[in-house]
Image (tube, rainbow, N blue to C red):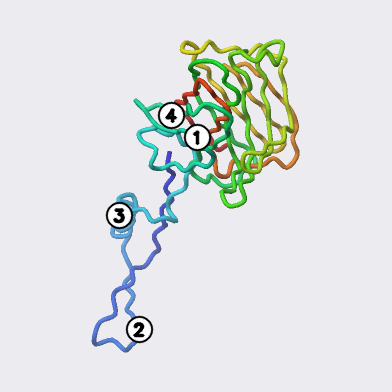
Amino acid sequence: MFVLFFACSSNYALNNVSEDSPQGSFSVTELDPLEEVEAAEELEEETEANPSEEDVEISDYCTPFEDFSEWSFFGDGNWHIENNVLYENKGGYYATTAYLYDFGQTSSFSMEVDARWEGNLNDLSGFVFNLDPDSGTHWTATIDDPQGDYERYSPNGAIIISHCIWDECTPVAQDSSLEMLAMAQHDIVNMKLEISDSSVSFYWNHTLALSQEIPNIGGPGIVGLYSNDNDGGVMYDDFCIYID
């Protein structure tokens, strides 16, 4: 959603300088109330039709996944869009991040996406935020081992919050107390990340899977999606960012 801000009209209209006027002077014509309303309406219509860059503020946003032209990525990934779904399925040992817009810094925001997996031996998938594409620093919030093929956790699956520099990530918080198992080719999982100041919550299919305090985490900044060693492949749809 794009929020437009309109300039307020004043009580006076400034006429153009005429050739007969002294240089640097202008005449002032006071508007009657009806003319003032009409002038304000005209200004509003013109601003709506041709908003300047300063008039447009990105707030809530859901990507249509029509093509990959608006996105950038780093890492050795195979990102592509088919039928309005974002795929990453390089396979092998790798990590990659696809990123989108800069949403600035705010004390409270959330992100959500629908995910589905193909094949087996899929590792980490999820969100990227607070990315600096020059230094490579960013945060990730991911599900690990969503098919349970590696049998790393009991119950299956873990949510991991990590601070990363390029493809090197250091886990900061983790929770594997909820059963998080997604059958490949079948299950579509809704994942949601909520951050309010230092409080971090991650939901797996609308059930709270992690809730921890992480000082100085911030965000959202530049946001995106993450894939690490997904041998079968991960698919993303309905990726949304909400600014509170």
Residue positioned 24% across, 85% down in the render: 19
Q: Quadrant of the N terminus?
A: top left
Q: Label 2 to label 1, Cα distance in Å? A: 62 Å
Residue 77's disc is 1
Point out the tag, 4 or 1, that comes first from the N-terminus. Answer: 1
Q: Name the residue under label 4.
A: 86
Q: Label 3 to label 4, Cα distance in Å? A: 37 Å
34 sits left or right of 79 in the view = left
Q: Mark 2 points at which residue?
A: 25
Q: Which of marks 4 and 2 is in front?
A: 4
Whether label 2 touches label 1, CB < 8 Å? no
Image quadrant assignment for residue 70: top left
Whether label 3 touches label 4, CB < 8 Å? no
Residue positioned 63% across, 37% down in the render: 108
Q: Label 4 to label 1, Cα distance in Å? A: 12 Å
Going by the numbered disc 3, the residue's amino acid type is Glu
Q: Mark 3 points at which residue?
A: 46
Point out the tag, 3 or 4, that comes first from the N-terminus. Answer: 3
Going by the numbered disc 2, the residue's amino acid type is Ser
Viewer-side residue, 152 vs 183: 152
